[in-house]
Amino acid sequence: MKNILIILGHPLKNSFCGALAKNYSAGTRKKGNKVRFLNLGDLKFNPLLKKGYKEIQKLEPDLIKAQKDIQWANHLVWIFPVWWGSFPALMKGFIDRTFLPGFAFKYVDDFKWKKYFKGKSARMVMTMDSFPWYYKIFIREPASRALRTTLSFCGVKPIKKTYFGSIMFSSKEKRKKWLRKIKVIGEKD
């Protein structure tokens, strides 16, 4: 049995990403896993890292709770839209503010660091208006590469990815098929 944290990176929980999160949750609960949600659009925090990591800003209560949920989880599921080739600014701000030195990692010297998320795995679920093959071949996956880099730096592995697109040109039937697919993925994760 796993502790799974679903992180919804879309600012609106009633989006297609939100529907994917619900279906993933239903599938993984069926397997007996425990699930918690983080809807980033509902959290109250300043997404700007004002002074870099030279001076850590005081964490808002929602970010303190988010860090506890991340520590609790052994599997992180990031569900988000690809906007302008990457993830939403809200998600970037969340990562900048929560994946802090001393929480997610700690430098030992110039070339070594401790990875505090060892033993955790992750899945990235991305929606896009382009077609996944186009995003992979021509755009070269900047969102998944950036998130994978961050998670790997902190010790998360394996990291799997799932793409859904083109959302813009999809039919109602296609979206229903994708919702069934994510439920099955949830059952297997």
Image (tube, rainbow, N blue to C red):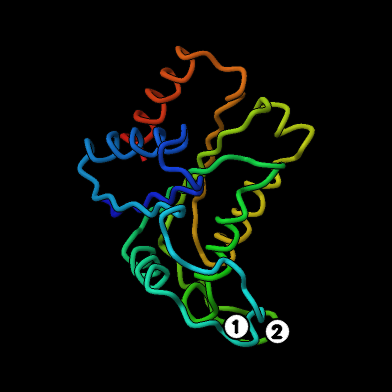
Q: Measured from the top left, where is residue 83 in percent x and y?
A: 66, 41
**Residue extending farthest right:** 138
The answer for how far apart the CA atoms under marks 2 and 1 are is 7 Å
How dense is the environment of label 2, judged by Cα within 10 Å: few (below 14), some, or many (20 and up)?
few
Q: Nearer the viewer, residue 146 or 113?
A: 146
> Looking at the image, do the residues carrying marks 2 and 1 touch, with CB atoms under 8 Å apart?
yes
Point 54% across, 79% down: residue:
101
Residue type at the position of mark 2: Asp
Q: Vertically, is 96 above or below 89?
A: below
How dense is the environment of label 1, judged by Cα within 10 Å: few (below 14), some, or many (20 and up)?
few
Point 56% across, 84% down: residue:
56
Point 70% across, 34% down: residue:
136
Q: Nearer the viewer, residue 128 or 159?
A: 128
Q: Measured from the top left, where is residue 12 in percent x and y?
A: 46, 43
Name the residue that disc number 1 marks: 107
The secondary element bearing badge 2 is classed as loop
